[in-house]
Image (cartoon, helix red, strand yellow):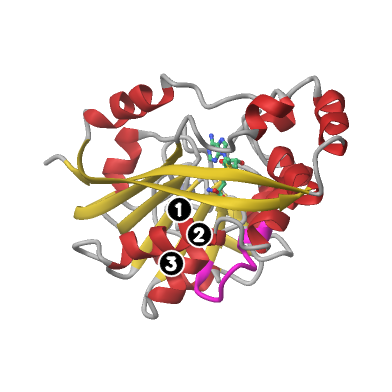
Amino acid sequence: MLADIVEHLICPVCGDGLALGERALGCPRGHAFDLARQGYVSLLTGSQAPGTADSAAMVAARADFLGAGHFAPLADAVADACHTAPRAGKVIADAGAGTGYYLARVLDRLPYAAGIALDVSKHAARRAARAHARLGAVVADVWRPLPLRGGSVDVLLNVFAPRNGAEFARVLRRDGTLVVVTPTPRHLEPLVERLGLLSVDESKERRMAESLSGHFTETGRRTYEFPMALDRAAVEAVVGMGPSAWHTESDDIRRKITELAESSEVTASFHLSTFESRS
Ligand SMILES: C[S@@+](CC[C@H](N)C(=O)[O-])C[C@H]1O[C@@H](n2cnc3c(N)ncnc32)[C@H](O)[C@@H]1O
Ligand SMILES: [Zn+2]
């Protein structure tokens, strides 16, 4: 709930603290942000959300796919990484949290922690708000100043989502940990080729290292790989929640899915890296 995390939030207009009222979050200077009926708050200011926000359909596909447990081994690995972080601590934030699936698994393992789910998609925030009792969901853009107090976060998660090294470093405590998950080029083999999906950009890894290197030092890195048996509905969900959902040729992809066998063996393959701030 927002009550668990409001002390860590700041007003996106003036940077002052925020307090939780009956219907809105407000700062001492009178800036107010309505609470959504579904329990989240939008701290976006000015114009619209960037075009990278997941749509309602993408978020629904993601919720279906994750809910079926296909990425459960990854959720365990993320929870392990948070649990064993030098400062597992009390405040866990997730930048680009989506449905809140990973953050909820982390909170299950850390009974005294509260979770802050940040995502620019209100459809995602709506789901995240229901993902765990100790989780508060906030609509915010990773490319703008995050609405979080400096040094307020013990562990920051970032799973398949955009990274803002400077802001991540500002909101993390000095001895805090950043946990980043990215897909490897083998992720979703052989579907990528068979369906003509957008593949993982090989230069993505390098860009990630560059975007964080000025602010963070990598302290650990592991690769997780496991097979998944996916029926056609699960294949449709994994396609619908990913970058290919933006693809103009989605009709063609849908047709190819109907031609797949009843069950396909698909590889899940991720890098999980931990970083600490450079001070
Ligand atoms: C591939 S999804 C991953 C979601 C979640 N971490 C997971 O793995 O289930 C990427 C998420 O980042 C969000 N996103 C995209 N651009 C963003 C931005 N500029 N600021 C915050 N979130 C953003 C999308 O709305 C989407 O929920
Ligand atoms: Zn204010």
Image side of residue 120 versus residue 38, left or right: left
Real-space CA distance between mark 3 and mark 2, rounded to the nearest whole angstrom: 6 Å
> Looking at the picture, which amino acid does disc 2 mark?
Tyr
Residue wearing tag 3: 106
Image side of residue 219 versus residue 15, left or right: left
Ligand 1 within 8 Å, label 3 CB: no
Of the two numbered discs 2 and 1 on the same chain, state the one appearing first in sequence.
1
> Looking at the picture, which amino acid does disc 1 mark?
Asp
Q: Residues within 10 Å of mark 3 (few under 14, many from 20)?
A: many
Q: Residues within 10 Å of mark 1 (few under 14, many from 20)?
A: many
Query: For the residues carrying marks 3 and 1, which lies nearer the camera in this image?
Result: 3
Magenta segment includes 133:
yes
Task: Tell me whether circle 3 and circle 1 mark residues in contact (CB < 8 Å).
Answer: no
Q: Image quadrant for the C terminus?
A: top left
Task: Tell me whether circle 2 and circle 1 mark residues in contact (CB < 8 Å).
Answer: yes
Q: Which residue does the image show at 63% across and 24% down from the upper left?
A: 198
Magenta-tinted stretch: 126-135
Q: Give residue 228's position: percent from left, percent from top.
A: 60, 52
User: Image quarter for residue 76?
Assistant: bottom left
Query: For the residues carrying marks 2 and 1, which lies nearer the camera in this image?
Result: 2
What secondary structure is found at the residue carrying circle 2?
A: helix
In front of the other: 38 or 83: 83
Q: Can you say whether 256 is above or below 236 in the image? A: above
Real-space CA distance between mark 3 and mark 1, rounded to the nearest whole angstrom: 10 Å
Q: Give residue 213's position: percent from left, percent from top.
A: 23, 29
Residue wearing tag 2: 102
Ligand 1 within 8 Å, label 2 CB: yes
Residue wearing tag 1: 94
User: Image quarter for residue 207?
Assistant: top left
Q: Which residue does the image show at 62% across and 31% down from the upper left?
A: 52
Task: Tell me whether circle 3 and circle 2 mark residues in contact (CB < 8 Å).
Answer: yes
Magenta segment includes 31:
no
